[in-house]
Image (spheres, grey):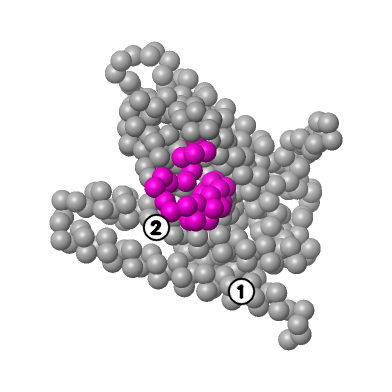
Amino acid sequence: MSQQHAPDAVQGAGEIAGHAAEATDAAHAGGHGGDIGTTILHHITDANTLDLGFTWNGHPVEIHLPHLEVFGVDMSITKHVVMMWIASALLIVGFGMAFRGRRLVPRGIANLLELIVVFVRDEIAVKNIGAKHGRRMTPYLLTLFFFILVCNLLGLVPFGATATGNVNVTAALAILSFFMIQLEGMRENGFLGHWKNLVPHGLPIFVIPIMIIVEVLGMFVKPFALCVRLFANMTAGHVAILAFLGMIFIFKSSLVAVAAVPLALAIMGLELFVAFLQAYIFTMLTSLFIGFSIHPSH
Amino acid sequence: MDSLQLPYVAAALGAGLAVVGGGLGIGKLASAALEGIARQPQAAGPIGTNMIISAALIEGATLIAEVVCILIVFLK
């Protein structure tokens, strides 16, 4: 039993050591005399440099990323943009290689991927949207699920950052879901029919203005909640891990590490579960809202 | 303590109180789920799945409050 847990613990401790090394170097380089708040902020927020985590001759090794501007809009390539590119590349290459043979019965890693794909198609898309439209919406839902999952998991890897811990990224995903919800409702029920479906039928006439306000607010609040839920879950987990490891630096004693590292390891395990769960919740709620938009159940 | 420190006090209090609400809500949810599983063990799968989904939604609300508290601290 202990032999089973030991390799996981060693691997986890290695990851935490990677993070702790990052914290040390960032504290020496970017922090004001090792200020733990600045260090945590440096880890959580986006930056124009890719911090490689180790120092060379006392200077931290960083890759300065290009600053681009398109028509006055800041489109510079930042750390989180690179993380999203890495996630996309991993997905494209991973799925492409897994399903290269396109056999009827998948082999190898394609088995696991097909399991997840079928789960998203049957349990999330078809169950919430219905058989006819569910299969049509499955590619979008699969993209959402796998992209959010890989972005979440990249944040747990040493020298990685959570792109979904950036509120701009989750806001973009929520806006995409908002457009999908509205467009699918309009495609199914017609342009006017979609807005008529906003308010339930058969209500007394004086309730309808209130219902319109409530439903329109709800139309905007639901994607907003999707955005903030994903962002807050990802950021809060990382802040907790960094705060526990930062206790070692606050107390300036290695003895605190005996308590801090196992705690941070446990929270990292929780973060692993939360990464999967939040990807599933985002996808399921998007499919639920699309289903409500297509078949108004009032 | 002068009134310049009040935002930090407010943020800390808010972050703690938010967890009280979320913890109570998820605790009630867990107790109902466990009772349902105890009554009908073969429904443990669907009950567990629905419990996890509901817990994630309640936790979403809790974490929105936490984000507000972080915004107080970092936006001054």
Q: In the displayed structure, would residue B33 be above or below residue B2?
A: above
Residue A61 or residue A279, whichever sits in front: A279
From the viewer's perspective, tell me whether residue A31 is left or right of residue A8: right
Quarter in which the N terminus of chain A is drawn: bottom left
Mark 1 and 2 residues: CB-CB less than 8 Å, in contact?
Answer: no
Any part of residue A144 in sight: no
Q: Which residue is mark 2?
A: B55
Secondary structure under tag 1 reads: helix
Looking at the image, tell me whether mark 1 or mark 2 is earlier in sequence order: 1
Instruction: Give how far across and how far down residue A73 sits, in percent.
Output: 80, 36
The boundaries of the magenta stretch are: A194-223
Query: Is B4 on the left or on the right of B58, as rendered?
Result: right
Residue A154 lies in the magenta stretch: no
Q: Quadrant of residue A251?
A: bottom right
Image position, residue A204 (x, y; %): 43, 54
**Subunit bearing disc 1:** B
Across and down, in percent, residue A291 comes to: 41, 37
Residue A77 vertical position relative to residue A206 in the rendered view, above or below: above
Q: Kindly identify which residue carries mark 1.
A: B12
Which residue: 47% across, 20% down?
Answer: A96
The reply to whether residue B44 is in sight is: yes
Instruction: In this rendered view, identify the residue nearer to me: A102 or A173.
Output: A173
Q: Is residue B35 above or below residue A232?
A: below
Neighbourhood count class around disc 2 (C-alpha, 10 Å): few under 14, some 14–19, many 20 upward: some
Same chain for mark 1 and mark 2? The answer is yes
Q: Is residue A214 part of the magenta span, yes or no?
A: yes
**Number of the front mark, 1 or 2:** 2
Q: Mainly helix, strand or loop, the magenta region? A: helix
- Residue at (53% x, 60% y) in the render: B63
